[in-house]
Image (cartoon, rainbow, N blue to C red):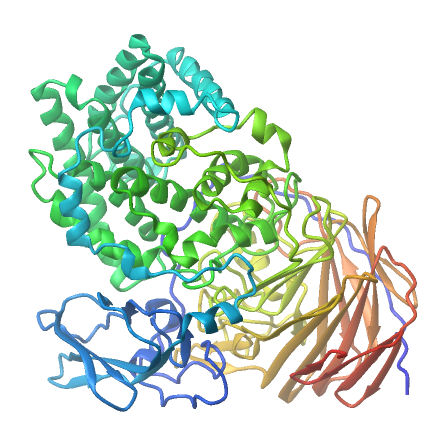
């Protein structure tokens, strides 16, 4: 029998006034979720596996740890082209003076590598593994006198042809991670390079100046000249005052003004030095040296220290290392000694803070600082007065191999928010470029680094202001404008990928009038001065990342004013800059946001941010019984609680498929719908199933969203949708509009009511635009939900037949039949 949309009821509420807040800060390490070290294992389905032939392991101590405290590489039942990185987790009850034991063996057979001298929870394997099946395990001595081992975790090394066959990217190529030198080799090789090390071997300033006259790079050179001339007009800033009291220290902690001043000085020193060399401008060189000496006079233990402002400290130690390298021959012995002493102090501070990464491998500031420390050490190794630099470079170079892909690992995805994916990219690209200019090593031999731009391309429309889909700072609409002409351009300069070249050139001003170009763009010409490849628009209109738990479905990915659906079901859960939004969708039509993740990011953990922005009920997602959703921090609360910061409440992509004009993605968010039992500190399940499947038809503009959920307790199920403007609702459909764009939502399933409000439960702490919060509520509680929502782009009438029999829903559109039933989706042949 064909189902029909149920009648809808509409209510409108007044808009609450918005508060103002001047301060804004970013988190270092979010508060942890519950400690499951001695509790129940994470729910089945959280970890990625290779399929049904690999039975789940019994839970061990590693699996029982909170997910944000462990980084398991390789994960159990995974397959890849290579495996050189092995990591696990630091535990509280390990005898710190007794090293870890590590064993790698052929599956069920001979041991091929063993170590019993590992002081950190990771190993960089310096041998290639042939195709086959393997197992690895680690063990430690506990403070209770026991030797405690993990289960044998299984992984498969596939032949290169298998890897290529599985790739969804035509440009994917086999790589050899062992081509990247180990830390000791790299540190030793750096010592033999003459200064300036930033100048690629075999090149010269004269050669770079000549290469920069070409049409691809002359706009960059001229823009940097403009920056250098502007720097000539700016006063040299005084050092920030030393904090006198605890109150003073609190005021400068994460002070953005200090950080921005330090960054400006680093960029001025770099630009004045390089343009001064290329143009033989002695005045610029003199001012660059003056700024370098002035920055070295900032107290390394003062307002810009690691503990007071870690982001300012990293800007300064990189500026000092760069200045020493570029001006080595012009500095006196005393000046070299003074700068080196401050540089050493600042790097040692930053390095000491990295010890936190053993216990908190997802600490965002620590992850970023690894790259900055390595950039500085590449230039500082061998300095008189800094004897530790070479050993530190060897150590932190190898640590960088583990931190460059923390939020995605294998396919270039970044699972901690779209805006923060850009910020990580902005940090990684200069690191890759510096390594290339100093050492000649190409880190883009690592697949996940070379492919990092693909997610940005998939989720950020080129040359268009548009909110991001997921994570903190969705309201930042200028990511492409900020970073395409400089960081993405340099990324494309190194990948030499025609599609990467297309992306940054969609805005013609990026070609002719680049915004804030980087001196590394010119220095890279010393390595490769050949013309850039001709741009080529993408022919692939979908993007999936199992690692990050993200999907992007486009009608036409080559358009700036795209029609797109974005989907998230991620193993990273609701941790750090991520929200309690597994299986949520975001919908954009003709470049206009229509169905959005609601809420704003005034500052991390503000009342609005933690209660509203991160909550499932403010996502286009499933809730129940008045807004209860994912990662609830209090079990049996009378109203929805603040979502817990946890990776243990994650999701995963179940199925991705492209067949003609149809694109499918489905996700399992069952493990996300849990709450903390505050008396035991353990998670309690709220639902027994929570699966969403989405099918987009690029040819008709129809998108189907199927929800299936079950619970042992009858629930009054709710489907939430949010929009920048109020919804228009009648008895047949609900419509979201934004300018000339619109989408209509038709609903098939149990009888519901519809209500909407423009009010916030807690208003943002800064003045922001109101948003519409709509909710379909099932009229009768039940233990099972099977529901279909049809999105009609531009509200175009499309002939559809929808037939429901229990949990099975079939959609007939012309000659095509699409069938949904619980976890199964069948597309037409």
Which residue does the image show at 28% across and 61% down from the upper left? 178
Can residue 750 be seen here? The reply is: no
Which residue does the image show at 15% across and 53% down from the upper left? 184
- Image quarter of residue 565: bottom right
- Total marks in image: 0
Name the spot of residue 160 as percent of width and height, x first: 42, 70
The one of 93 and 170 positioned closer to us in this rendering: 170
- Image quarter of residue 587: bottom right
Name the spot of residue 297 as percent of width and height, x first: 20, 23
Name the spot of residue 553 as percent of width and height, x first: 67, 61
Q: Is residue 34 left or right of residue 761?
A: left
Q: Where the N terminus falls, by quadrant?
A: bottom right
Name the spot of residue 700 as percent of width and height, x first: 84, 62
Can residue 195 be seen here? The reply is: yes
Which residue does the image show at 36% across and 13% down from the upper left? 279
- Image quarter of residue 69: bottom left
Q: Is residue 708 left or right of residue 172?
A: right
Q: Where the C terminus falls, by quadrant?
A: bottom right
Above-or-below relation of 613 to 787: above
Above-or-below relation of 483 to 609: above
The one of 445 and 27 positioned closer to us in this rendering: 445
Above-or-below relation of 36 to 70: below
Q: Is residue 482 left or right of residue 624?
A: left
Which residue does the image show at 39% across and 46% down from the upper left? 428
The one of 191 and 641 positioned closer to us in this rendering: 191
Above-or-below relation of 229 to 604: above
Residue at the far top: name it: 283
């Amino acid at each position: 029998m064909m189902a029909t949309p149920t009648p809808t009821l509409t209510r409108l509420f007044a808009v609450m006034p918005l508060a103002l807040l001047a301060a804004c800060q970013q988190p270092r390490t979010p508060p942890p979720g519950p400690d499951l070290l001695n509790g129940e294992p994470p729910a089945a389905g959280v970890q990625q596996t290779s399929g049904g032939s690999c039975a789940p392991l019994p839970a061990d101590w590693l699996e029982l740890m909170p997910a944000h405290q462990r980084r398991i590489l390789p994960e159990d039942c995974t397959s890849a082209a290579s495996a050189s990185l092995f990591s696990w987790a630091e535990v509280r009850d390990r005898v710190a003076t007794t090293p870890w034991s590590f064993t790698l063996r052929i599956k069920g057979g001979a041991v091929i590598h063993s170590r019993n001298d590992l002081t950190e929870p990771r190993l960089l394997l310096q041998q290639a593994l042939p195709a086959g099946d393997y197992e690895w395990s680690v063990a430690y001595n506990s403070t209770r006198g026991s030797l405690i081992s993990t289960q044998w975790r299984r992984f498969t090394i596939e032949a290169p042809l298998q890897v290529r066959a599985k790739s969804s990217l035509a440009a994917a190529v086999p790589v050899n991670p062992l081509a990247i030198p180990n830390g000791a080799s790299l540190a030793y090789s750096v010592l033999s390079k003459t200064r300036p090390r930033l100048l690629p071997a075999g090149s010269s300033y004269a050669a770079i100046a000549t290469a920069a006259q070409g049409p691809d790079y002359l706009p960059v050179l001229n823009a940097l000249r403009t920056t250098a001339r502007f720097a000539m007009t700016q006063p040299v800033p005084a050092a920030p005052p030393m904090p006198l009291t605890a109150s003073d220290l609190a005021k400068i902690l994460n002070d953005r003004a200090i950080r921005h001043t330090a960054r400006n000085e680093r960029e001025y020193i770099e630009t004045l030095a390089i343009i001064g060399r290329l143009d033989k401008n002695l005045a610029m060189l003199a001012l660059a040296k003056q700024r370098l000496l002035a920055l070295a006079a900032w107290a390394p233990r003062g307002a810009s220290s690691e503990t007071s402002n870690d982001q300012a400290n990293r800007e300064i130690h990189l500026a000092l290392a760069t200045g020493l390298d570029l001006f080595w021959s012009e500095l006196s012995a005393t000046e070299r000694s003074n700068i080196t002493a401050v540089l050493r102090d600042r790097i040692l501070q930053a390095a000491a803070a990295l010890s936190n990464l053993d216990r908190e491998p997802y600490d965002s500031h620590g992850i970023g600082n690894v790259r900055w420390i390595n950039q500085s050490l590449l230039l500082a190794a061998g300095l008189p007065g800094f004897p530790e630099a070479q050993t530190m470079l060897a150590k932190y170079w190898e640590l960088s191999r583990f931190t460059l892909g923390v939020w995605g690992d294998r396919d270039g995805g970044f699972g901690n928010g779209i805006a923060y994916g850009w910020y990580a990219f902005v940090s990684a690209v200069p690191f890759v470029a510096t390594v290339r200019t100093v050492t000649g090593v190409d880190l883009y031999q690592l697949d996940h680094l070379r492919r990092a731009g693909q997610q940005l391309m998939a989720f950020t429309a080129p040359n268009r202001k548009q909110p991001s889909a997921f994570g903190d700072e969705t309201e930042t609409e200028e990511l492409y404008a900020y970073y395409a002409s400089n960081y993405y351009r340099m990324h494309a300069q190194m990948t030499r990928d025609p599609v990467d070249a297309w992306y940054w050139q969609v805005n013609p001003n990026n070609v002719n009038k680049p915004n804030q170009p980087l001196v590394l763009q010119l220095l890279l010409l010393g390595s490769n001065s050949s013309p850039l490849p001709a741009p080529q628009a993408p022919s692939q209109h979908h993007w999936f990342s199992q690692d990050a738990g993200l999907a992007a479905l486009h009608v036409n990915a080559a358009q700036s004013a795209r029609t797109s659906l974005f989907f998230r079901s991620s193993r990273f859960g609701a941790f750090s800059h991520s929200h309690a939004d597994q299986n949520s969708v975001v919908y954009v039509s003709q470049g206009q946001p229509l169905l959005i993740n609601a809420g704003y990011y005034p500052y991390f953990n503000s009342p609005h941010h933690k209660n509203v922005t991160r909550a499932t009920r403010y996502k286009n997602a499933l809730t129940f019984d008045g807004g209860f959703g994912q990662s609830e921090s209090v079990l049996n609360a009378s109203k929805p609680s603040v979502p817990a910061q946890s990776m243990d409440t994650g999701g995963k992509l179940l199925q991705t498929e492209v067949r003609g004009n149809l694109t499918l993605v489905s996700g399992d968010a069952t493990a996300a719908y849990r709450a903390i039992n505050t008396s035991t500190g353990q998670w309690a399940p709220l639902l027994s199933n929570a699966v969403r499947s989405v099918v987009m038809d690029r040819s008709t503009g129809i998108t189907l969203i199927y929800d299936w959920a079950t619970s042992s307790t009858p629930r009054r199920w709710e489907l939430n949708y949010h929009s920048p403007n109020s919804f228009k609702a009648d008895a047949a459909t609900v419509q979201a509009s934004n300018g000339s764009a619109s989408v209509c939502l038709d609903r098939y399933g149990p009888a519901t009511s519809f209500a909407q409000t423009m009010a916030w439960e807690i208003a943002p702490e800064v003045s922001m635009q109101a948003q519409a919060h709509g909710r379909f509520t099932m009229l009768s509680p039940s233990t099972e939900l099977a529901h279909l929502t049809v999105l009609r782009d531009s509200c175009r009438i499309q002939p559809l037949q929808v037939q429901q029999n229990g949990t099975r829903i079939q959609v007939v559109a012309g000659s095509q039949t699409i069938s949904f039933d619980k976890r199964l989706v069948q597309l037409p042949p």
